[in-house]
Image (tube, grey):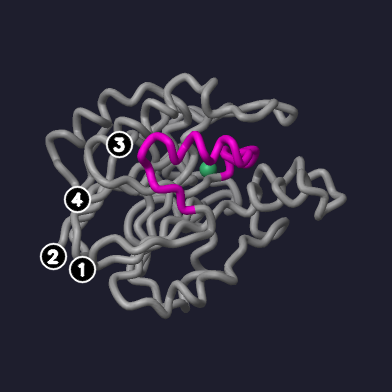
């Protein structure tokens, strides 16, 4: 795992964690204890692959995810937004997440010191919730992949969010949402993950990312006001990581 540091015009030292996928997190907490961020932003995908008919609540049956959130909350104020791997979370699951001390930002925002911090939930999680509550007839099996072509994220609340005073920080698991939903909004910093750096990196370019296809644009680094983590898990289901180390990202005030 590598530590990546970006300088950005932000009022706080922020650690961005994404795509841990229910793996061992001891290296991460060791880094956090040394680097001492002011806040921790967990930008989705704390869970691994689970079956579509998995019974909920699932959070108390995870291997590491719950302990990971608890550990983060013990180190610094921590904020979590929902990624595509959290598509099945029930209300009980969300209560369990809150019980770790982490602030859950499920298409919602909170004020924290001079910042307002929001979390844009993965469109697949929104679609599954609609299906489960009977608002949608369609079984959203393919929503799991979350391409914005298939589902729209719930962006209505962002209007109120971007009118707030203070540094507007948005956690959004999906970097591919940026051009369509986020670039033209008054947001100061967007933190994302999901693309795993493009899984295989050749000549500084990722090879594939879900929702973006081959040679994706948004897999790593700074794009406008968005910072993308290459993620913390070793592998995706089928494709290994190559020339693409796992990373923990720190955003340091200029
Ligand atoms: Fe993801």
Mark 2 or 1, nearer chain start? 1
Q: Secondary structure at mark 2?
A: loop
Disc 3 or disc 1, which is closer to the eye? Answer: 3
Q: For the residues marked 4 and 3, what is the alpha-carbon distance in whole angstroms? A: 11 Å
Mark 2 or 3, nearer chain start? 3
Q: Is residue 121 above or below residue 84?
A: below
Mark 3 or 1, nearer chain start? 1
Disc 2 or disc 3, which is closer to the eye? Answer: 3
Q: For the residues marked 2 and 1, what is the alpha-carbon distance in whole angstroms? A: 5 Å
The image position of residue 194, as x and y in percent, is: 49, 45
Q: For the residues marked 2 and 4, what is the alpha-carbon distance in whole angstroms? A: 15 Å
The image position of residue 231, as x and y in percent, is: 39, 39
Mark 4 or 3, nearer chain start? 4
Q: Which residue is mark 3?
A: 72
Q: For the residues marked 1 and 4, what is the alpha-carbon distance in whole angstroms? A: 15 Å
User: In the rendered view, does 126 fall on the left or right side of 83?
Assistant: right
Q: Which residues are magenta?
A: 84-105
Mark 2 and mark 1 in contact? Answer it, CB < 8 Å.
yes
Q: Residue at x 32, y 45 (%)?
A: 78
Q: For the residues marked 3 and 1, what is the alpha-carbon distance in whole angstroms? A: 24 Å
Q: Secondary structure at mark 4?
A: loop
Residue 9: image tag: 1
Q: Based on the displayed image, in which of its 4 quarters is residue 181 positioned?
A: bottom right
Q: Residue at x 20, y 28 (%)?
A: 30
User: In the rendered view, does 152 fall on the left or right side of 94?
Assistant: right
Q: Bin the neighbour count of mark 4 within 10 Å (Cα to Cα): few under 14, some 14-19, many 20 and up.
A: some
Q: For the residues marked 2 and 3, what is the alpha-carbon distance in whole angstroms? A: 24 Å
Q: Secondary structure at mark 3?
A: helix
Residue 38: image tag: 4
Q: Which residue is mark 2?
A: 254
Going by the picture, which residue comes out furthest to the right?
A: 137
Q: Bin the neighbour count of mark 3 within 10 Å (Cα to Cα): few under 14, some 14-19, many 20 and up.
A: many
């Amino acid at each position: 795992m590598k530590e990546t540091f970006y300088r950005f015009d932000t009022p706080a030292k922020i650690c961005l964690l994404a795509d841990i996928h229910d793996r061992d997190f001891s290296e991460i907490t060791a880094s956090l204890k040394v680097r001492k961020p002011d806040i921790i932003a967990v930008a989705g995908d704390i869970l691994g692959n689970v079956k579509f008919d998995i019974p909920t609540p699932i959070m108390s049956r995870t291997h590491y995810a719950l302990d990971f959130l608890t550990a983060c909350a013990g180190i610094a104020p921590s904020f979590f937004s929902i990624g595509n791997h959290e598509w099945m979370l029930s209300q009980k699951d969300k209560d369990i997440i809150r019980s770790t001390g982490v602030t859950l930002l499920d298409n919602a925002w909170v004020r924290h010191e001079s910042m307002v911090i929001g979390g844009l939930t993965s469109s697949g999680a929104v679609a599954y919730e609609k299906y489960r509550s009977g608002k949608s007839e369609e079984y959203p099996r393919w929503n799991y992949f979350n391409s914005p072509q298939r589902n729209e994220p719930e962006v209505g609340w962002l209007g109120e969010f971007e009118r707030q005073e203070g540094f507007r920080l948005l956690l959004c698991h999906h970097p591919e949402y940026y051009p369509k939903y986020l670039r033209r909004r008054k947001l100061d910093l967007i933190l994302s993950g999901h693309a795993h750096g493009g899984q295989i990196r050749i000549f500084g370019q990722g090879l594939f990312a879900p929702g973006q296809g081959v040679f994706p644009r948004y897999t790593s680094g700074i794009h406008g006001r968005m910072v993308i983590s290459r993620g913390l898990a070793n592998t995706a289901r089928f494709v290994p990581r190559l020339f693409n180390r796992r990373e923990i990202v720190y955003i340091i005030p200029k």
